[in-house]
Amino acid sequence: MKTVTERFLKYISYNTKSDEESTSFPSTDTQLAFGRMLVSELEEIGLKNVKQDKYGYVTAEIPANAEGFYTVGFIAHMDTSPDASGENIKPQIIENYDGKDIKIGEKILSPLEFKELSDYKGQTIITTDGTTLLGADDKAGVAEIIYAADYIMRHSEIKHGTIKIAFTPDEEVGRGVDFFDTAYFGADFAYTMDGGKIGELEYENFNAARAKIKINGKNVHPGYAKDVMVNAALIGTELAQLLPQNETPAKTSGYEGFYHLTAFSGTVEECKLTYILRDFDAHSLEKRKETVRNAIEAINKKYGSVAQAEIYDEYSNMAEKIKENMHIIDIAKQAFKNCGVEPLIQPIRGGTDGARLSFMDLPCPNIFAGGHNFHGVYEYVPVSSMEKAAEIIVEICKTAICSSNQSK
């Protein structure tokens, strides 16, 4: 039986970076290729109803071998973030980590900067080589789910209900469940294995919106530009300064929301800005959208009608749906404790496929997959965290007993 680490190292060799600018679904063909490989593995393990549909979703199930259990699902996404290269990943395996700086190419992964590294002294850690991301977001989740499925198939003495599995594309670009068929999936509830450090159990996430701003300028010869030129790039920088400078990701934490400038490109003729807007409170998110509109209005009042924006919602806070189904959290908490892991209940300063699925009649909180420093070259994952996540998946399947049957 392959270890969870062996599976993880195989999966990250596939470049599955998604593409925000693509109009296809999934956004990259490499995700389809990766999904086809996963289908072969799931069939080899012996899972039933294994398929990859026309959208790239990979689904499978383990039939129930006992009555009185919920039908529980486990979900992870196949794509990696477009924020960093996912091609030709060369992982470094650091055994018996000594708690000191780790050299990753020309860069240093240091516990002085990334304090949680110190928690893994003496453990085996997998890092990047400093030129790509690692892909633990979310290949760790994929590896953990498949390892757990393999383990359950090999241990018929484990009593469980029907277990559903799904791997989704394009989560990183916010389109991961655009075509996901929750009725076909058929789970009573599910968990995304897409969290960070060991212990995380999350059922609150940001409400999310995106603002795409375009500024039209007027370019003429600079020697004759007085009172004629309209420099779109300069106006773009001015607009950025109109938004609250102390409400950015680098200056907020906990339940604080933010304005995040994710892309800026500009010339005299044209400037484009992309912002993601985040807040745990839906009313506060509406205020953030209004602040952006007011900034654009101020620019247009000063320069004429040069700026326009498309502002749209991306996902909502799953807490609204999970709080109606807290038995899902209770099952997970019990599984954590049975596996010797203290549940770390905290809000997700981001979003998962589960946030949207929770509003599609599939309540879906999030469980740690073990990785740290996602979306960049400083990403790493402790092996023991992946192993414990896989153990918790198995334990949830064992403890997902319908409340009406718990006394039987």
Image (spheres, grey):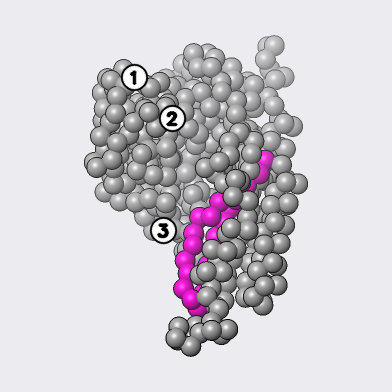
Q: CA distance from mark 1 to mark 3?
A: 38 Å
Please, what is the three-letter code of the amino acid marked with disc 2? Answer: Gly
Q: Which mark is residue 121?
A: 1
Residue 246: percent from left, percent from top: 60, 45
Quarter containing the N terminus: top left
How many other residues sit within 10 Å of disc 3, few (<14), some (14-19) or many (≥20)?
many
User: Viewer-proximal residue, 18 or 344?
Assistant: 344
Q: Is residue 306 above or below residue 282?
A: below
Residue in the image at 53% along x and 36% along y: 192
Residue placed at 63% from the left, 43% from the top? Answer: 257
Depth order, front residue of 23/154: 23
The kind of residue on which mark 3 rests is Thr
Kindly tell me whether residue 292 is visible in this rendering: yes
Q: Is residue 336 above or below residue 55?
A: above
Rounded to the nearest whole Å, what is the CA distance between mark 2 and mark 3?
26 Å
- Give the quarter of the image for residue 124: top left
Camera-side mark, 2 or 3: 2
Q: Is residue 5 visible?
A: no
The answer to whether 64 is drawn above or below residue 337 in the figure is: below
Task: Tell me the SS state at disc 1.
Answer: loop
Residue stretch in magenta: 258-280
Q: Is residue 267 magenta?
A: yes
User: Regarding mark 3 in the picture, which secondary structure is present there?
Assistant: loop
How far apart marks 1 and 2 lie (CA) works out to 15 Å
Residue at the disc numbered 2? 370
Lower sequence index among marks 1 and 2: 1
